[in-house]
Image (cartoon, rainbow, N blue to C red):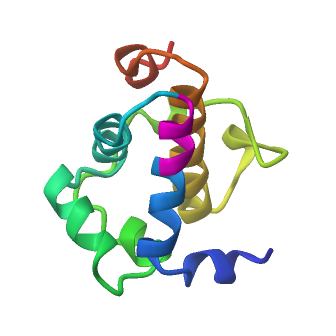
Amino acid sequence: MENSKIYNMPFGKVYPLLIAKAEKKGRTRTEVLCVTSWLTGYTAGEIESFILSDITYGDFFRGAPAPSKNTELIKGVVCGVRVENIEDPLMRSIRCLDKLVDELAKGKKTEKILMGE
């Protein structure tokens, strides 16, 4: 899938899939909101409101008020691609969120995920 298709997907369709992935493995919506907030700087309330809005996935990340300065600590493979090798900053942010949710789904503690351990 080309990047523009991902960028133009409705946030309200994509984000609930991340929540469902985590919940299927016994994690909570709150934990997904926590890692998303850490990554983007949005509050949990803002993220929840975006689910009901018409914002695109790309615009959600482009408009992030305080992107984490520690995203370089996020490493690993998502969708067959090594996160740390993604050159496009927008796609890297998207895949970083995927990786954070993957780590939650694997049972890693939220505190350890956000500390880059």
**Any magenta on residue 32?**
no
Q: Residue at x 42, y 15 (%)?
A: 109
Q: Residue at x 28, y 77 (%)?
A: 52
Q: Position of residue 15 (x, y in %)?
A: 46, 61
Q: How many marks?
A: 0
Is 95 on the left-hand or right-hand side of 16?
A: right
- Res 61 quadrant in image: bottom left
Residue 117 position (above or below residue 22): above
Is 12 on the left-hand or right-hand side of 91?
A: left
Q: Nearer the viewer, residue 85 or 7?
A: 7
- Res 89 quadrant in image: bottom right
**Quick one: quadrant of the N terminus?**
bottom right
Residue 8 position (above or below residue 31): below
Q: Which residues are magenta?
A: 20-25
Please tell me whether the stretch drawn in magenta is mainly helix, strand or loop.
helix
The residue furthest right is 80
Q: Nearer the viewer, residue 30 or 81?
A: 30
Is 43 on the left-hand or right-hand side of 106?
A: left
Q: Residue at x 30, y 62 (%)?
A: 64
Q: Position of residue 100 (x, y in %)?
A: 51, 36
Q: Position of residue 56 (x, y in %)?
A: 44, 81
**Any magenta on residue 23?**
yes
Q: Position of residue 116 (x, y in %)?
A: 48, 19
